[in-house]
Amino acid sequence: MQWQRIVAVGAWHEGCPAGREQLRNVTLTHWGFDGRLHRGVLVVNADVVDSVKRIFARLLADRFPIRQMKPIEEYGGDDNASMSADNSSAYNCRRAGQANAPAADSPHANGRAIDLNPMENPWMDLRCHCWQPSSRYATRTPGTGKITEGDAVWQAFHADGWIWQDIKTPDYQHFDTGYPSRPYTGTLSNS
């Protein structure tokens, strides 16, 4: 993990709950939209590393395509730029002005959330009442790189105790281990 870069771009700043001691780089093999194997990196909390490896092994076995998987610092800590690039990411203690729960509670700021294929799995931004990064794939029908309730991706995360879009606002790219974020136990946190 390149901690200086995470700090320099503002993906970590004063008040963020997870710091250098809690965060880990996890390098994962995944299928791309081009039908080839690729390597990607997610930055996550140490307490979810084994879970993330299990989930992504299942996605690999199911040949679920992921456009790309780069840490948020590759996009200057800018969640909107990462989503527009259809980048799957995890840790981000977002700056003011970006969609975020209070940092102490935020699954992303704690390294316990993953956004998967944001272009194919957009979220409704209530600040503009618009789909981000695009409305093109807002309808939940099966498709390449899309997530629907009960599908193989949903099952892989759910089997390991992760929750899909656990808020009232549609957020089809988002899986986390519960809100407010707390240490991962391997069970559904909101049950």
Image (cartoon, rainbow, N blue to C red):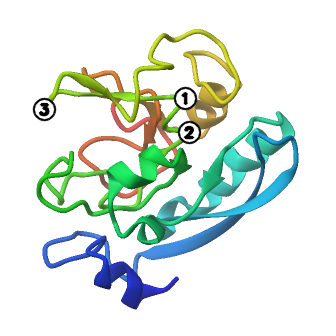
Q: CA distance from mark 3 to mark 2?
A: 22 Å
Residue 9 appears in which quarter of the rendering?
bottom left
* Circle 2 Cα neighbour tier, 10 Å, few/some/many (<14 / 14–19 / ≥20): many
State the residue position of label 2. 117
Q: Amino acid at mark 1?
A: Glu
**Could you tell me the amino acid type at mark 2?**
Asn
In percent of width and height, residue 118 lies at 48, 38
Asked if residue 165 can be seen in this view, the reply is no
Q: Say which residue label 3 marks.
A: 127
* Residue 131, image quadrant: top left
Q: CA distance from mark 3 to mark 1?
A: 21 Å
Mark before the other along the chain sequence, 3 or 2 = 2
Label number found at residue 110: none
Q: Residue at x 30, y 83 (%)?
A: 7
Q: Percent from the top left, x then y, of residue 132?
A: 34, 33
Task: Classify residue 155 as left or right of residue 182.
Answer: right
Expressed as whole percent of the image width and height from the top left, the position of residue 25 reads 57, 73
Tag 3 and tag 1, C-beta contact below 8 Å: no
Tag 1's secondary structure?
loop
Give the CA separation, mark 2 to mark 1.
6 Å
Q: State the mark number for residue 120.
A: 1
Reading the chain from its start, which is encountered first: label 3 or label 1?
1
Crowding at label 3, few (<14), some or many (≥20) Cα neighbours within 10 Å? few
Instruction: Classify mark 2: helix, strand or loop.
Output: loop
Left or right of 180, for residue 149: right
Are the residues flagged by discs 2 and 1 in contact, CB closer than 8 Å?
Answer: yes
Q: Quadrant of the C terminus?
A: top left
Question: Where does the image place residue 14, in percent across and percent down from the top left?
Answer: 14, 79
Q: In front here: 186 or 76?
A: 76
The answer to whether residue 138 is seen in the rendering is yes
